[in-house]
Image: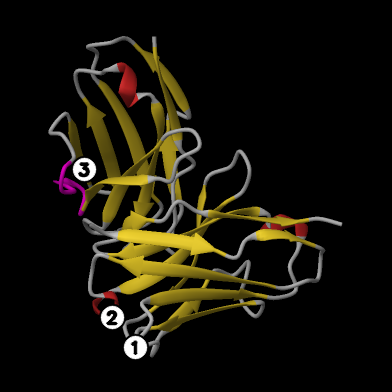
Amino acid sequence: QVQLVESGGGLVEPGGSLRLSCAASGFIFSDYYMSWLRQAPGKGLEWVSYVSFTSTYTLYAESVRGRFTISRDNAKNSLYLQMNSLRAEDTAVYYCARDLFGTSDWGQGTVVTVSS
Amino acid sequence: DIQMTQSPSSLSASVGDRVTITCRASQAISIYLGWFQQKPGQAPKSLIYATSTLRSGVPSKFSGNTSGTDFTLTISSLQPEDSATYYCQQYNSYPHTFGQGTKLEIK
């Protein structure tokens, strides 16, 4: 079955960087758009970014544009999110997701905390 | 960006009841609307896509419908395990925006 396992979260100071990873299995990774979404503590869901099959197209939420970079390695069945210039408001659980008619499958999430 | 206005923000219902949650889109999104269930401490789970199509394995007690830019999720024969927060998401255009969520309590 579809499995998405995120890693790379942690505590980082404002202005710092983190790189999130997502290991995918149970499906042909290169056949799907992939996305990152997040959920701040006690808040709702927010779409962050997506990448197309072969990384030709990417898109970002306005809140992270210019600071975050999404990428994928189809040979490794992996999705990444490079997060730079982190702010306190980026504190959230970050989810990796497969896109099939909208967001279809979610990982369990990785926690990112931005604090001094 | 397309705004999704979800209501109510919370509701309480009894075992066996039927409830309806509504999402209104700020502009036309055709049928590109999905519904998610999230239980505390867990990742969201996709229930419905394309307004009314159930994801594989989702029980038929969940159903979706639309009237123009208003979309509804109906849950019938409520059970304790249906207690969760439910979200809608439009995927007609990026960014794929969500409603604010509806917290469902089972009395």
Dot 2: element: helix
**Mark on residue A54?**
1
Q: Residues within 10 Å of mark 1 (few under 14, many from 20)?
A: some
Amino acid type shown at disc 2: Ser
Looking at the image, can residue A71 be seen? Answer: yes
Residue A23, percent across and down?
Answer: 41, 69
Q: CA distance from mark 3 to mark 2?
A: 36 Å
Judge depth for marks 1 and 2 and give the one in front. 2
Count the labels in the image.
Answer: 3
For disc 2, the chain is A
> Residue tagged by mark 2?
A30
Do badges 1 and 3 share one subunit?
no
Residue A3, percent across and down?
Answer: 33, 59
> Residue tagged by mark 3?
B67
Find residue A50 and report its image quarter. bottom left
- The reply to whether the C-beta atoms of the residues labelled 1 and 2 are less than 8 Å apart is yes
For disc 3, the chain is B
Residue A26 on the magenta segment:
no
Do badges 1 and 2 share one subunit?
yes
